[in-house]
Every structure is written in C-alpha cells, then in structure tokens.
Amino acid sequence: MPAETHVEGVPIERREVLEIVKDRLADILEIEPSDIGEGDSFANDLDADSLALIELVEALEEEFSERSAGFRIDDDDLDDLKTVRDAVDYVVSRLG
C-alpha cells in the first residue's frame, strides 16, 4: 500500500475510494478490478454473497481505520449498500 493511503487526517478523493473498493472487492471475488463498474449491484451483477460483503466491510474498515480513527461500517447500514456506488458514497460520507 502506498503510504499516502495510510495517513490520518489527509483527505481522500472519491476516485481513490472507488479504486480501493474495486481492488478489495476484486481480491475477494477473484476477478479483475476492471470488471467492476461503479453502478454494479453486489448481488445481481457481481454475484457477491453475504460472506463476500462481510469480507469487503472488514477490508474497508481495516483500510480506512488509519485515515479516520475508529472508521466502521455500521451493521444497520449494510442493507443500504446494494451497489459499488453505495459503498463508495458511504465511505466518502463517513470520512467526511
């Protein structure tokens, strides 16, 4: 990981969040990041099951916890994360 993705307090651009989400999801689903579109549905387009989504949440929490102390994706919010765009928007809003 480049050092700049692990510095607390440094703003992160939405584009960078999108790339991180796509990279982590690609690792979990064993596909190429280029095969993941921002509008893709986790369930319908990417065939991601609930375990894959839990792994994604854990990977994102680990990735972004150094940027925003205690960064977490609330369990109550998981039902609202249906697409890659939803996940990116959620992370960006939480990083503020």
Image (cartoon, rainbow, N blue to C red):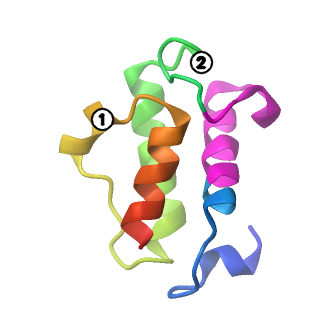
Task: Name which residue type carries label 2.
Answer: Leu
Task: Judge whether 78 appears above or below 39 on screen.
Answer: below
Q: Position of residue 30 (x, y in %)?
A: 71, 26
* Mark linked to residue 46: 2
Q: Which residue is mark 1?
A: 80
Neighbour tally class for label 1: few under 14, some 14-19, many 20 plus, Cα within 10 Å: few
Residue nearest the observer in this picture, 48 or 62:
48
Residue 30 sits inside the magenta stretch: yes
Quadrant location of the C terminus?
bottom left
What residue is rendered at 68% in x and 31% in y? 37
Between 53 and 86, the one lying in front of the other is 86
The residue lying furthest to the left in this view is 76
- Mark in the foreground, 1 or 2: 1
Which amino acid, mark 1? Asp
The spot of residue 11 in percent (x, y) is: 57, 80
Determine the image quadrant of residue 91: bottom left
Stretch in magenta: 18-38
